[in-house]
Image: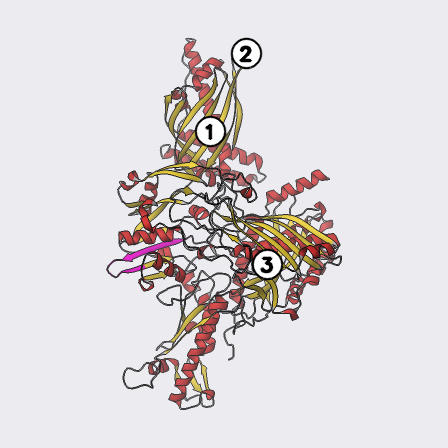
Amino acid sequence: MAKKYVGQRMTRTEDPRLLTGQALFVDDVDLPDMLHAAFLRSDYAHARLRSIDVSAARSRPGVVAVYTAEDMGDAWRPGPPLVSPPPTVEDIVFHSRTQVPLVKDKVRLAGEPLAVVIAESRYIAEDALEDILVDLEPLGAVVDLEKALEPDAPLVHDDLDSNLAAHLIQEKGDYAVAREKADLVIRRRILIDRGTAAAMENRGIVAHWDEKNQQLTLWDTTQAPIPIRNGLAGMFGLSTHQVRVIAPFVGGGFGPKIMMFYPEEVVLTWATLKLGRPIKWIEDRRENFFATNQERGQVHDAELALTRDGRILGLRDDFIHDTGAYDPYGLTVPLNTQCHALGPYEIPNYYGELKVVFTNRPIVSPLRGAGRSQGVFVIERLLDLAAKELGIDPVEIRKRNLLSPDVFPYDNKIIDQAFVPLVYDSGNYRPVLEKAAAMIDYDRFLNEEQPRLRTEGRHVGIGIVSFIETTGIGPYEGARVTVETSGRINVATGVGTQGQGHFTSFAQIAADQLGVSPRDVHLVTGDTSQFHWGTGTFASRGAVVAGNAIHAAATTVRDKVLKLASKVLETPEEELELDDGQVRVADIPQRSISLGELAVRANPLRGAVEPGTEPGLEATAYFGPKYGATASGAHAMIIEVDPETMMVEIKRYVLVEDCGTVINPLIVEGQLHGGVALGIGNSYYEQLMYDENGQLLNASFADYLVPTASEVPRVEIAHLETPSPLNPLGSKGVGEGGCIPVPALFAQALEDALADYDIEILEAPMSPNKLFELLQGKEKEQ
Amino acid sequence: MKVEGEYVFNGPREEVWELVRDPEVLATALPGTQSLNQVSENEYQGKMHVRVGPVAGVFSGRVVVSDEVQPESYTLTVEGRGSPGFAKGTGQVQLTDQGDGTTLMKYEGEVQIGGKVASVGQRLLDTASKSMIRQGLEALNKALQARVAQSEGQEEVEYNLPSEAKFAAAVAKDMAGEMLSSSRMIWMAVAVIIVIVIVAVIWMSRGGG
């Protein structure tokens, strides 16, 4: 089948609605008789709850109910784990401790909800929070990752012997032997700290139990409407058919909205079942800094063993990963870190010891990049330092170690986040790196431009890094494709959409199979009443897994269309073609029938059909890959640093990506732009600062610096395509690739720009302050 | 957060001692104090309206005086909480007779601050607390001079305590001053001062919060 629309730079069909304010977001849901909820959250990061008195709040006019953990009775249960620990690794330690709807005995993170007020308005609810008297006994907080494991550290979970949440070792080859043989061993301590997703839309929920209909409806900013529906039905003893979860347009997911269950989802559902009135809760920005999951905190002790000519013999990467107060998301993030430290390189020997610790900080779950950028930071930093030590050019040392295109599928012999062996399905890494170097004019910059600018006293530097991104993992997604009697195509899928352009790229896939314009394809996503099998939008998998399910369903519908048309037009199927909403006889274009007419005929109102006939032109199909598709890329940039203010200006930013078959280059580029912006934040601006008591010190956009238009440069993008053999479309994910390598790239460029200071960047994010301190330290040394 | 500093009172040490142990004087010297009651020999309880940048609200708490060496030194333990967050700290206060009729007060302590006031007001916290302490001490000094004058049978010195709005405006001025001295971007600081002044004016015109 010819690809007419897949691969086209189509503008997004959803944008007119979004840009004119006509798209439905959770906060737009306004129901008659609706109540509003506000949560009382702990100011302390770690404290014992001695008592809580809500009587004054209950008697405030306009307050309908105030609930604490005690009021929830048997409905109070710690949340189920979202993903389970890996069963395939021996000697694994994993302690599952999941979040609670409302604090019952002990506060484990600042911002954990203690009580909920439900009132006629949010104003009243917020005022009533101040009427609640809480007696909390503050406890010593666990904040520092290494101190968390010291014997005298306070315990986040009293029933455990320590704050160790998980421990596992992954090995490939024999690192100790490799190290013996090495000419050079580079060992460093590398720190990576936390950031927040800072989605434009905070979380929000409207929960409505309709007593007469016996129907629960939940509008939720979740990335996983179907699992939320299934979970809530189970939790509250309802049939899944009584529960409808709608994730309408969502203003950015970025991972934290895949979490289930956030306390608010459980509490609001429980409360509407009790009160029989709709209840709305919209997270405010300050709440978001405390109540929405975060990511990135790790401390690495890593070493790279190499030969004299820069070939990697082995990598050892022992690290501590901060999971926050609970670990509902298992080991997804640190396993991604382990996998991505191996990167696009041939690393024959690997040893990685992982310790996951509980701390009194918000829960860690994947945030765009999801552990990958930490792994990339580690290997790229070590490679840069090795290159410097060995006198090899940074691009050259990478080329010497990139996997060659004939090794695929390449088994890296450790397990990945989906607990299956880490196998790279396909790839061709060298052209990607070379293309990036060519686009940024690497040699000319180093040989001509940089020396010239340096003589002018300017601090300009270049960076270039390679990386892979594991994407498109299972288990599965599904789709239902229907030809409507209007001739339009309806596609329903379960993944949920948060701005990825699904309405357009999914339509392009269906349109190619059914010979219609993508603008005649109507997509429904994120509504469990429309399609109710699936898992959600995460791990850069929408286009791969849901995209291929749509492709499969559309292909089946195409077969049905041709079969019926063959009968109607009395022509063999092979002689028919689909185009422009019509089925035509190839040689006699005037002999044709429209898809709409066929849809009418496929659903007769009277008469007899052949036994076994299914009505309509409709099909449902599922797609689940054997394992994930591995995308790759290379980023390069030129920066200038002002060594007085430490401000950085990005002069050029170039990236080359290979995400297999590109469905829509415009959308892929949009994803990459956004990813790079987050990456820049993670490199130099966005860091959540906690004090030793677990208090977040920068919980506002005045103090937590999200890059703005002036920090994000124009990004020059090129695409190379190595189609994945694991799915019919050949696609790989690209949702996270933009942000993953940026901190490593930024560090390399900073070091190069400040070469005369001879600094080492071993921390992400950096900041003007930290850079200043590094330079000060160097000046003192000299 | 570390709190430390010193201040010279224009009066004898015994008078200063009396003053700093008098809840009524303390309550009026620190604007925003809604109540301050002595509940036992060494314990005070009270409520105070606090504003740090965008965060405002009532703290209720207690102050315990211990290790008292009259009239030289004492230890203060402060604990407060409210909608803006919580504060908990211990500090040492020392009074030295300087021999010239003045008294040097030295104070140092460590305060743990949490909640909204820490997470949103962090970068204003240091200046705001210094400014509040300075202004509080200045008000106390005025009260002291009024007392001294009275006890010496002189004409009563005018003693006007600052209103909460004036107090807040002074805090804002201190913050702006700090930004000016530490920043090379003067134009930005000027803009910030203008905004702060406007906010202060609006706030004052609303009747002093």
Which residue range is magenta in the image? A203-216
Amino acid marked by disc 1: Met
User: Of marks 1 and 2, which one's residue comes earlier in the chain?
Assistant: 2
Q: Is residue A407 above or below residue A589?
A: above
Q: CA distance from mark 3 to mark 1?
A: 51 Å
Q: How is the image coloured?
A: secondary structure
Q: Is residue A767 magenta?
A: no
Badge nearest the viewer, 3 or 1: 3
**The one of A126 and A309 positioned closer to us in this rendering:** A309
**The one of A221 and B42 positioned closer to us in this rendering:** B42
Q: Is residue A206 magenta?
A: yes
The count of marks equals 3
Image quadrant in which you'd find residue B54: top left
Q: Chain of mark 2?
A: B
Amino acid marked by disc 3: His
Q: CA distance from mark 3 to mark 2?
A: 71 Å
The answer, for residue A194, to whether it is visible in the render is yes
The residue at which mark 3 appears reads as A340
The percent position of residue B143, horizontal first and vertical second, equals 43, 18
